Amino acid sequence: MSPVAHASGAALAFDVAGPDDAPVVLFVHAGVATRAMWDPQFDDLARDYRVIRYDTRGYGDSPGDANPYSEVEDLVAVLDAAGVERATVVGASRGGGFALDAALAHPDRVSGLVLIGAAPSGMSDDDIVYTESERELERAMAAAEAAEDVDTLVRIEVQLWDLGPDRDVDDVDPAFVERAIELNVGAAHWDFAGTPVPAEHPAIDRLGEVAVPTLVVIGDHDVTDCRVAADVLLAGIPDAEELRFPDAAHLPSVEHPERFTAQLRDWLARRSA
């Protein structure tokens, strides 16, 4: 049975493995998955890193009450429950946003950032030009949500996020599509009624204050706003490095796990050398 971190009306399930005295890496999942999206990285890095992953509130094995809460304070609660002072935080999509906010709100707890398909809190999409395919998928997603049609919603989310708006199932490995559906269905967050409280000081106005090594990861097939956000992060965070996946969309760590893990290991080794 997984250990649990208690935080403001939620029980956050997490896993921890690896040597007690090793550098710590905390994984935070995307909104179309659970902590299971990190299976390959968690198992591999546990050989010589202390690794932690958790289901964010309302996802997977982490139930939460219908009350206001802070994703950043949830993240810190998991570190506390695991007995960890500082960690490099690897966050995908919304998880990357929490990681960035945590690095700014609690600089003593975050020693490095890996931001995958992530956007800084407070970023506006007013000037972003979306493709017609993206707009069609967003409209279809809204209709499925209104109809409470979970099966259709899963299919559309996998198309938009995992495949990307400019690819279809024939363009990717069938095993990846199967895994993407499995992760999305397992998230089981459709009826969660908690209210996330936004960061008091949005990251979009504070990127220059990020004082830890940062790796910005982006897939060339990701949605337009995530690709724009990657450029914003790279321009605003001092000395941020870029890692591009020309053959991936929103979840390169799931679509190409061996390559992603190898490149993550290389970055972790270089920054600690």
Image (tube, rainbow, N blue to C red):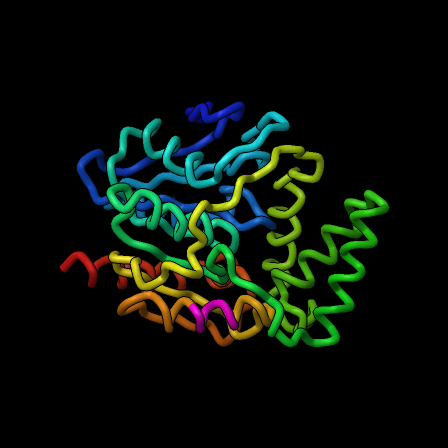
Q: Residue at the location (58% across, 28% down)?
A: 63
Q: Residue at the location (60% across, 58% down)?
A: 175
219 over 115 or under it: above or below: below
75 over 204 or under it: above or below: above
Q: Position of residue 132 (x, y in %)?
A: 74, 75
Quadrant assignment for the C terminus = bottom left
- Left or right, 61 with respect to 26, comes to right
Q: Residue at the location (82% across, 43% down)?
A: 148
Q: Position of residue 218 (x, y in %)?
A: 47, 68
User: Observer-nearest residue: 153 or 255?
Assistant: 153
User: Observer-nearest residue: 191 or 106?
Assistant: 106
Does the stretch in magenta take in 230?
yes
Is residue 159 in view from this perspective? yes
User: Observer-nearest residue: 142 or 261?
Assistant: 142
**Principal SS element in the magenta part?**
helix
Does the stretch in magenta take in 218?
no
Q: Which residue is most to the right?
A: 147
* Magenta stretch, residue numbers: 228-232
